[in-house]
Each structure stands twice: as C-alpha cells, then as structure tokens.
Image (cartoon, rainbow, N blue to C red):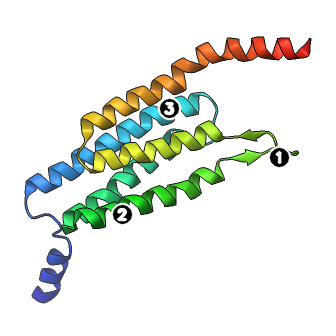
C-alpha cells in the first residue's frame, strides 16, 4: 500500500517548489481573463465563437507553452512548439469561416482572426510576456469594439453610392 501511495504522490509532483505552482496559476488565470475579454466582445456581437471559446483558446495556447517550459526544453524546441500551436489553431479558425453560395461572400473572417490573435496572446502569456499580452489584448479589443463605430458609416455610405 505504501508503494502505491508513493507512486501516486510522485506522479502528481510536477512542481519543484511553490513558486512554479504560483506562476502556472497566475499565467493560466491571466490567459482566461484576456481571452475572455476578447470573447466577450464576440459574444455580444452574436458570433458563434464567444467568451468560452476565446478563454479556452488563450488558456490552451498558454498551457502548450507552459508544459514544455516546465520540462526544460531548449529555445529551438520551443520554436517548434509555437509553430505547432499556430498551425493547429489555423484549423480551428478555418472552421469558423463560411463561404456563401457563389464563393464570393465569406463570413467569419473577423472571428477567425480573433481566435488566431487570442492564441497569440496565450502564447505571450505562457512565455511570461504578460505586459505584451495585456497591451495586445487592449489593442485587439479596440479593433473589435471601437473600429466598427467608424467603419459602419463608411460601409453604409459606400453601399448607398453603389445603389445609385
């Protein structure tokens, strides 16, 4: 019985000390928060990929970075991990893009770009670049939330001109 107990304890001893656990918790919570901020805007806009999707994408990307960091991989190996995350998230993004009947009208491009960008923010968080992640989240939020206030009048004006 004691050998089973020691195996179970060793199996769940990923962290060398408490500071590693705190870093993991802080980074994953930050990824949830930042991903959620972008997802909230998408959900309020009625898009399919909303708050939960963005939270999971951001946290997943951060986790894909944190695990190899804990294992102590080299920078060149980390580069391959990042490439894998980017390629994998591309498949998720492709699923959010729908083409119209005549293959000329595509929808979901902004949502796909948002998911892709959310993964990049997760990577930044996972790498410990929290200030970069926060800044990029705020800039992305401006693009998603503020820019439409300026682009809608332009689109309406352009549509009325083409109707003439």
Q: Is 87 left, or right, of 17 in this rendering?
A: right
SS under mark 3: helix
Residue ID for mark 3: 40
> What residue is rendered at 67% in x and 16% in y?
152
The residue pinned by badge 2 equals 81
| Residue 49 appearing in the image | no
Please tell me which of labels 3 and 1 falls first in the chain.
3
Does residue 102 appear anywhere in the picture?
yes
Mark sitting earlier along the chain (2/3): 3
Answer with left or right where residue 69 lies relative to residue 46. left
Q: Which of 96 and 105 is in front in this view?
A: 105
> From the image, which quarter does the C terminus lie in?
top right
Whether label 3 touches label 1, CB < 8 Å: no
Q: Quadrant of residue 84?
A: bottom left
Q: Name the residue under label 1.
A: 103
- Checking the image for residue 141, the label placed there is none
């Amino acid at each position: 019985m004691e050998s089973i107990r020691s195996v179970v304890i060793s199996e769940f001893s990923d962290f060398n000390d408490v500071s590693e656990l705190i870093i993991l918790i802080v980074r994953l919570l930050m990824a949830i928060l930042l991903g959620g901020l972008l997802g909230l805007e998408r959900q309020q806009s009625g898009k399919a990929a909303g708050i939960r999707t963005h939270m999971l994408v951001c946290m997943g990307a951060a986790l894909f970075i944190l695990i190899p960091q804990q294992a102590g991989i080299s920078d060149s190996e980390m580069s391959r991990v990042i490439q894998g995350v980017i390629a994998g998230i591309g498949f998720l993004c492709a699923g959010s893009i729908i083409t119209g009947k005549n293959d000329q009208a595509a929808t979901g491009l902004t949502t796909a770009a948002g998911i892709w960008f959310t993964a990049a923010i997760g990577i930044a968080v996972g790498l410990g670049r929290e200030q970069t992640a926060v800044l990029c989240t705020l800039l992305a939020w401006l693009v998603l939330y503020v820019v439409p206030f300026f682009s809608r009048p332009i689109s309406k004006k352009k549509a009325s001109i083409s109707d003439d």
